């Protein structure tokens, strides 16, 4: 009697799905990483000190609600601490939201091209993804707010990846009013942008805002993110999250990081200045570059193959992200690095 393949025990949804593929993470070597939107600069020394102090108490479970972080973040963001839910990066928050609102046979919606993890989260719930193309100017067309009896959750990255473009606060409020379900505004890159929507849950409890400390706070390796939403929403989501979904080291580091707003302002200033200089340099080389409000740029050369340019840079020890969106286009997403790293990219491409 033949034994069944181990795959026979997996859910059909899992067997059928394509896994989310993160950016390449080289192990060792001297590659310059400009492919995963990490900070080119280390976090403030206070973060390291806080983590070292927390490391002396690892025999104890961490605070399941990350209260120290929520209290300090509430002051910084001018919201109530009960509006904040913490997680293992903003991906964990997105997972919690999807588990809470989306069930098998329902539908989620998000713009395309954008963060492909949204599709994976929907598939894990046995739900359908409705991916609505951005307009030519990277705005959202009227169909994005259309009614649908099966729709349970809408994701809106703002700024968007891979383009760095944004939807206005006014349109987000309008979308929330028209949509028949909650609207998740994913603000992973918002510290590099001119405005935020973190206050909008107070205007409409259907709006929920996710944030991460991976980018602007230089804590990609720590994994800490959070949600700002109506307190009633947060109270319900606590039932869905893992018991201890943030550890003692990440809570200590994240609290110290958000406490240092002076460091954040300087880090954002440097990154935005380099981003603008990179945009000008790429345009001078003939690239079409979209104005970005994030810590990366999306670019494409009208006469050169994007995949070949990606390989050229890789051979030179420069990792950028080649992305090909089916039915749309391909291009290069280049993270903001140090000035010397961006000079190296421009020199190779030139």
Image: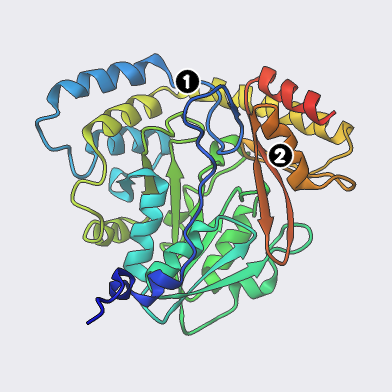
Q: Looking at the image, which residue is at 56% across and 24% down? A: 40
* Residue at the spot 48% in from the left edge and 25% down from the top edge: 28
Residue holding disc 1: 42
> Nearer the observer, disc 2 or disc 1?
2
Question: How many marks on residues?
Answer: 2
Q: Is residue 227 left or right of residue 3?
A: right
Q: Residue at x 19, y 44 (%)?
A: 64
Q: Find residue 334 and report its image quarter.
A: top right
Which quadrant of the figure has residue 32?
Answer: top right
In the figure, is residue 82 to the left or right of 188? left
Closer to the chain start, of discs 2 and 1, is: 1
Secondary structure state at the residue bearing disc 1? loop
What label does residue 283 carry, if any? Answer: none
Distance in Å between CA atoms under marks 2 and 1? 28 Å
**Is 130 located above or below residue 118 in the figure?**
below
Local packing at callout 2 (Cα closer than 10 Å; few below 14, some 14-19, many 20+) is: some
Which of the image's four quarters has the N terminus?
bottom left
Q: Residue 290, can we see it?
A: no
Q: Which element is circle 2 on?
A: helix
Name the residue at 41% across, 47% down: 90
Query: Looking at the figure, which quarter contains the C terminus?
Result: top right
Q: 244 above or below 13? A: above
Q: Which residue is mark 2?
A: 311
Find out whether the residues at labels 2 and 1 contact each other: C-beta distance under 8 Å: no
The relative height of residue 253 versus residue 95 in the rendered view (above or below) is above
Decide if residue 280 is on the left or right side of residue 102: right
């Amino acid at each position: 009697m033949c034994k069944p393949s181990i795959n026979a025990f997996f859910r059909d949804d899992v067997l059928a799905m394509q896994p989310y593929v993160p950016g390449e993470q080289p192990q060792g070597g001297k590659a310059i990483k400009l492919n995963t939107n990490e900070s080119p600069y280390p976090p403030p020394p206070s973060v390291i000190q806080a983590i070292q102090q927390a490391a002396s108490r690892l025999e104890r479970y961490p605070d399941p609600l990350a209260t120290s972080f929520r209290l300090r973040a509430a002051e910084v963001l001018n919201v109530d601490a009960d509006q904040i839910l913490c997680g293992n990066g903003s991906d964990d928050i997105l997972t919690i939201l999807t588990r809470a609102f989306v069930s098998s046979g329902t539908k989620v919606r998000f713009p395309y091209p954008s963060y492909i993890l949204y599709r994976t989260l929907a598939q894990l719930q046995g739900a359908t993804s409705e991916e609505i193309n951005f307009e030519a100017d990277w705005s959202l067309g009227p169909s994005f707010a259309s009614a649908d009896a099966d729709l349970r959750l809408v994701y809106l990255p703002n700024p968007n990846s891979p383009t760095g473009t944004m939807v206005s606060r006014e349109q987000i409020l309008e979308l929330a009013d028209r949509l028949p379900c909650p609207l998740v505004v994913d603000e992973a890159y918002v510290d590099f942008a001119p405005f935020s929507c973190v206050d909008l849950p107070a205007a409409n409890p259907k709006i929920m805002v996710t944030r991460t400390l991976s980018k602007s706070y230089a804590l990609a390796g720590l994994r800490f993110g959070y949600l700002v939403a109506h307190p009633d929403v947060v109270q319900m989501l606590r039932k869905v999250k893992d018991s201890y979904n943030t550890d003692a080291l990440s809570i200590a580091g994240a609290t110290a990081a958000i406490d240092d707003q002076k460091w954040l302002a300087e880090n954002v200033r440097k990154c935005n200045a380099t981003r603008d200089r990179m945009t000008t340099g790429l345009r001078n080389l003939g690239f079409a570059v979209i104005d970005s409000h994030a810590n990366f740029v999306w670019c494409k050369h009208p006469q050169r193959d994007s995949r070949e340019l990606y390989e050229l840079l890789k051979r030179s020890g420069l990792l950028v992200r080649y992305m090909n969106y089916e039915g749309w286009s391909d291009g290069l997403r280049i993270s903001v690095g140090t000035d010397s790293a961006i000079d190296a990219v421009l020199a190779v491409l030139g």
